[in-house]
């Protein structure tokens, strides 16, 4: 859920983890994938409202569940964008 300024905040280490998951999925499908730098550029253009926290925040079960749901949604959207841009 976006905060009052309209941004969605993820934990600091997650962007690279999302890229590694995307990369693994694309390699498993024998498809070309973006480098981490290319992935970050696409992220900035496609998801300007999603920010990475500067520090790790303590989270509970509810926050963890919402974060997992957000990661799944982001990954679905990234698959669509990356399929168009990389394929």
Image: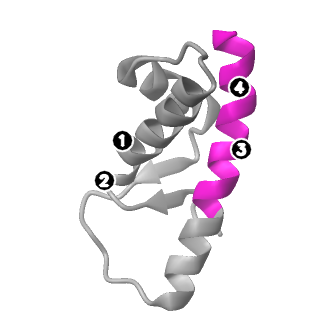
| 33 horizontally vs 56: left or right | right
Query: Rounded to the nearest whole Å, what is the CA distance between mark 2 and mark 3?
Result: 19 Å
Query: Rounded to the nearest whole Å, what is the CA distance between mark 4 and mark 2?
Result: 22 Å
x and y, in percent, of residue 86 in the image = 63, 11
Query: Rounded to the nearest whole Å, what is the CA distance between mark 4 and mark 1?
Result: 17 Å
Q: Secondary structure at mark 2?
A: loop
Which circle marks residue 76 in the picture?
Answer: 3
Visible in this render: residue 82?
Answer: yes
In the picture, the quarter occupied by the N terminus is bottom right
The residue to which callout 2 is attached is: 13
Q: Which residues are magenta?
A: 70-87
The residue to which callout 1 is attached is: 16
CB contact under 8 Å: marks 1 and 2: yes
Query: Rounded to the nearest whole Å, what is the CA distance between mark 1 and mark 2?
Result: 6 Å
Q: Secondary structure at mark 4?
A: helix
| 27 horizontally vs 83: left or right | left
Q: Earlier in the sequence, mark 4 or mark 3?
A: 3
Q: Nearer the viewer, residue 37 or 54?
A: 37
| 4 horizontally vs 83: left or right | left
Mark 1 Cα shell of 10 Å, populated few (<14), some (14-19), many (≥20): few
């Amino acid at each position: 859920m976006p905060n009052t300024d309209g941004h969605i905040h993820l934990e600091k280490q997650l962007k690279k983890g999302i890229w590694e998951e995307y990369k693994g999925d694309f390699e498993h499908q024998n498809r070309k994938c973006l480098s981490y730098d290319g992935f970050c550029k696409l992220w900035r253009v496609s998801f300007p409202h999603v920010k990475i926290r500067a520090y790790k925040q303590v989270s509970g079960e509810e926050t963890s569940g919402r974060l997992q749901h957000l990661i799944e949604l982001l990954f679905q959207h990234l698959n669509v964008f990356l399929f168009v841009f990389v394929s």
